Image (cartoon, rainbow, N blue to C red):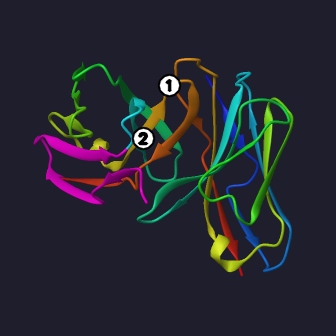
């Protein structure tokens, strides 16, 4: 079964906040990542959070982690059309450098 | 800048052909990965390597093999291509980090079509 789950689509209006959600099943995951994929490009790391943190903020991005529920979210404030992309949640483990990705959430920002 | 380069952006191959997808990174990364990306399924790990000549199976290794003869190069091999291997293939690399939390850098992908 899937280790990491995300909804496939999200549509917001420019200027609104976007919240992309992710759930994972493996409680031994120690790092959780958000990657962004723009059309025709590879993935780029946006941010990551260590599992002993609840929240991490970086400019317009806020990551929230609920370890008890194994739920991760990415909030993008003041969403812009340039934020339109596919966002992937991924999990990684201590002392193991491979990662498992979710299916990706396609964010569409309407003007 | 880290660069991960995949040899082809687009490939069209016939069923039964042997196919080589090449990936080269220039940052002396220990780890290298091959994923395939399909709509609705996201990225699925095929194989990864954490050192020269070392390889580990990912979630979907069937029908694929890999080769890591040099640190900077990781090849994905389709021994006998089939139509269900039509997909986008992504290569990635990262430094080995004993405690995890390592950033992976991705190539732009190779879109393979098997006819």
On residue A103, the disc is: none
Viewer-proximal residue, B26 or B43?
B43
Q: Position of residue A93 (x, y in %)?
A: 48, 31
Instruction: Name the residue rendered at 59%, 19% in the picture.
Output: B97
On residue A90, the disc is: 2
Q: Position of residue B99 (x, y in %)?
A: 52, 18
Q: Position of residue A68 (x, y in %)?
A: 21, 34
Between label 2 and label 1, give the one nearer the viewer: 1
Magenta stretch bounds: A1-25
Q: What residue is shown with label 1?
A: A94
Question: What quarter of the picture does the C terminus of chain B occupy?
Answer: bottom right
Q: Chain of mark 2?
A: A
Give the left or right position of residue B32, taking residue B19 as reference. Answer: left
Tell me if label 2 and label 1 are in contact, CB under 8 Å.
no
The answer to whether residue A45 of the structure is visible from this angle is: yes
Q: Position of residue A110 (x, y in %)?
A: 18, 55
SS at badge 2 = strand
């Amino acid at each position: 079964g899937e280790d990491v789950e995300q909804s496939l689509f999200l549509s917001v209006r420019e200027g609104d906040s976007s919240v992309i959600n992710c759930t994972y099943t493996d409680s031994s995951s120690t790092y959780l990542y958000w990657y962004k994929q723009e059309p025709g490009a590879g993935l780029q790391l946006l941010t990551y959070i260590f599992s002993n943190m609840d929240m991490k903020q970086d400019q317009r991005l806020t990551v929230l982690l609920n370890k008890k529920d194994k739920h991760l979210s990415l909030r993008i404030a003041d969403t812009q059309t340039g934020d339109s992309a596919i966002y992937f949640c991924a999990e990684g483990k201590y002392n193991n450098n491979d990662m498992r990705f979710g299916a990706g959430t396609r964010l569409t920002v309407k003007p | 800048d880290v660069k991960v380069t995949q040899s082809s952006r687009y490939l069209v191959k016939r069923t039964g052909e042997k196919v080589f997808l090449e990936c080269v990174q220039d940052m002396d990364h220990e780890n290298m990965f091959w994923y395939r990306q399909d709509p609705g399924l996201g990225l699925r790990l095929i194989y990864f390597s954490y050192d020269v000549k070392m390889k580990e199976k990912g979630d979907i290794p069937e029908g694929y093999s890999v080769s890591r003869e040099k640190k900077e190069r990781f090849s994905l091999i389709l021994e006998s291509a089939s139509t269900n291997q039509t997909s986008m293939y992504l290569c990635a690399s990262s430094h080995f980090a004993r405690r995890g939390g390592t950033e992976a850098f991705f190539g732009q992908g190779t879109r393979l079509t098997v006819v």
